[in-house]
């Protein structure tokens, strides 16, 4: 670390019973270069205090609200205050927390989708530029080593000209109406299907946005137009739980994006197939250490994580030798360690390392929010809509 010390952070959200907050904390701690020193873990001060005690934090740095945390941390000396804020709340809280943190000069790592509206997303883009802070968005699937290898193959022309992209994210956990079990019993289902907290979309906003981001990261292709069919299958649910989207990419490639939360028996089967004029590739999140490459005139190849024949960037993001699986936490950790090293370099007045800036940015967040809203717009009219978009720098 250029600073010669750990990068310190405070977390907003991730209180008792929160799934994703614990994932973020484990990922941030994995490489021993990032330290959690403060938090406003819940809008309930008692729950925030409880979580702080479980994490053995200094009680004076466990706060009852994010406003209190940002204000009091900002008053601490440079050598003591947090360096960045990690936001792991339900979607509707992302914008106000990020805005407050950026305006106070803190760097930000935020869960996706970045905001509820495109206007909020563009506001964060402008604020990040104005205050010159680092903003990382945890589209964690871009952190998998073999996803980076897939991107290298595309960029190096191994697939030829890209013609078609098929990306799917089926889950089955919302196949029944869980929301009536109550906030405590089905906390994740309740807020993720609530328009006030999740935004205009559930399925596309929650997992479809991951699929879109993965396709864009690997191929480098930008959306031009989409035609969406969104359905709410489970009676009583307020937002859609299934989506099927035809995609037209800039440059002429076509695609299919499928996301579902009611596909019974599916767990977390995010997968992508990219078809070019020379070859095709396939990657599955449930088998993340393998990448398939297929040809019309030769045998199939399988790239395996941890081997010396992989690209330099792929090896850089690999922690353990081949044959020892790396997966979800490590992919999250790659986002965190890159953001932390970039923050450390910025605070030290140095340039970040060669691969350290390889993480989703505030602009990626704006693209994702725009995609969600365009999918909902198309789904309402069941027609093609213009999906092209350039976020503000």
Image (spheres, rainbow, N blue to C red):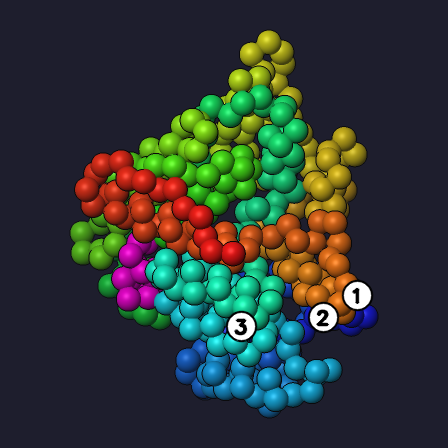
Q: Which residue is drawn at the image coordinates 43% and 65% (left, top)? A: 123
Q: Residue 175: x percent and y percent?
A: 29, 48
Name the front one of labels 3 and 1. 3
Q: Earlier in the sequence, mark 1 or mark 2?
A: 1
Alpha carbon of mark 3 to alpha carbon of mark 2: how far?
Answer: 15 Å
Residue that numbered label 2 is attached to: 347
In the rendered view, would you say 148 is above or below 192? above
Residue that numbered label 1 is attached to: 2
Q: Earlier in the sequence, mark 3 or mark 2?
A: 3
Q: Quadrant of residue 381?
A: top left
The disc label shown at residue 149, or none: none
Q: Are marks 1 and 2 in contact (CB under 8 Å)?
A: yes
Alpha carbon of mark 3 to alpha carbon of mark 1: how far?
Answer: 22 Å
Q: Which residue is drawn at the image coordinates 57% and 88% (left, top)? A: 72
Give the position of the N terminus as an image quadrant. bottom right
Residue that numbered label 3 is attached to: 102
Q: Which residues are magenta?
A: 191-203
């Amino acid at each position: 670390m250029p600073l010669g010390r750990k990068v310190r952070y405070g977390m907003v959200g991730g209180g008792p019973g929160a799934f994703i907050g614990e994932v973020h904390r484990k990922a941030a701690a994995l490489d021993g270069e990032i330290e959690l020193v403060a938090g406003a873990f819940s809008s309930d001060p008692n729950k925030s205090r409880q979580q702080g005690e479980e994490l053995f934090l200094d009680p004076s740095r466990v706060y009852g609200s994010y406003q209190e945390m940002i204000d009091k941390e900002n008053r601490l000396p440079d050598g003591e205050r947090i360096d960045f804020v990690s936001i792991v709340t339900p979607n509707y809280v992302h914008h106000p927390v990020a805005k407050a943190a950026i305006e106070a000069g803190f760097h930000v790592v935020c869960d996706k989708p970045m905001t509820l509206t495109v206007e909020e997303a563009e506001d964060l883009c402008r604020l990040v530029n104005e205050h010159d802070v680092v903003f990382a968005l945890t589209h964690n699937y871009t952190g998998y080593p073999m996803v980076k290898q897939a991107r290298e193959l595309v960029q190096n022309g191994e697939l030829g000209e890209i013609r078609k992209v098929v990306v799917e994210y089926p889950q089955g956990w919302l196949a029944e109406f869980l929301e009536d079990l109550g906030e405590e019993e089905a906390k994740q289902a309740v807020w993720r299907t609530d328009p006030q907290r999740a935004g205009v979309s559930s399925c596309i906003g929650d997992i479809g946005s991951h699929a879109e981001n993965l396709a864009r990261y690997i191929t480098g292709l930008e959306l031009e137009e989409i035609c969406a069919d969104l359905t709410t299958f489970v009676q009583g649910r307020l937002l859609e739980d299934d989506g099927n989207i035809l995609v037209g990419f800039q440059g002429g490639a076509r695609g299919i994006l499928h996301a579902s939360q009611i596909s019974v028996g599916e767990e977390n089967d995010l997968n992508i197939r990219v078809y070019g004029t020379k070859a095709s590739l396939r990657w599955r999140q449930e088998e993340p250490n393998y990448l398939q490459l297929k040809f019309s005139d030769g045998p199939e190849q399988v790239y395996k994580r941890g081997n010396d024949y992989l690209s330099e960037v792929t090896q850089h993001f690999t922690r353990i030798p081949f044959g020892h699986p790396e997966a979800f936490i490590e992919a999250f950790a790659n986002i965190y360690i890159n953001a932390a090293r970039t923050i450390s370099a910025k605070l030290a007045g140095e340039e970040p390392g060669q691969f350290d800036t390889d993480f989703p940015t505030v602009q990626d967040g704006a693209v994702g929010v725009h995609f969600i809203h365009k999918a909902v717009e198309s789904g309402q009219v069941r027609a093609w809509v213009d999906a092209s978009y350039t976020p503000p720098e």
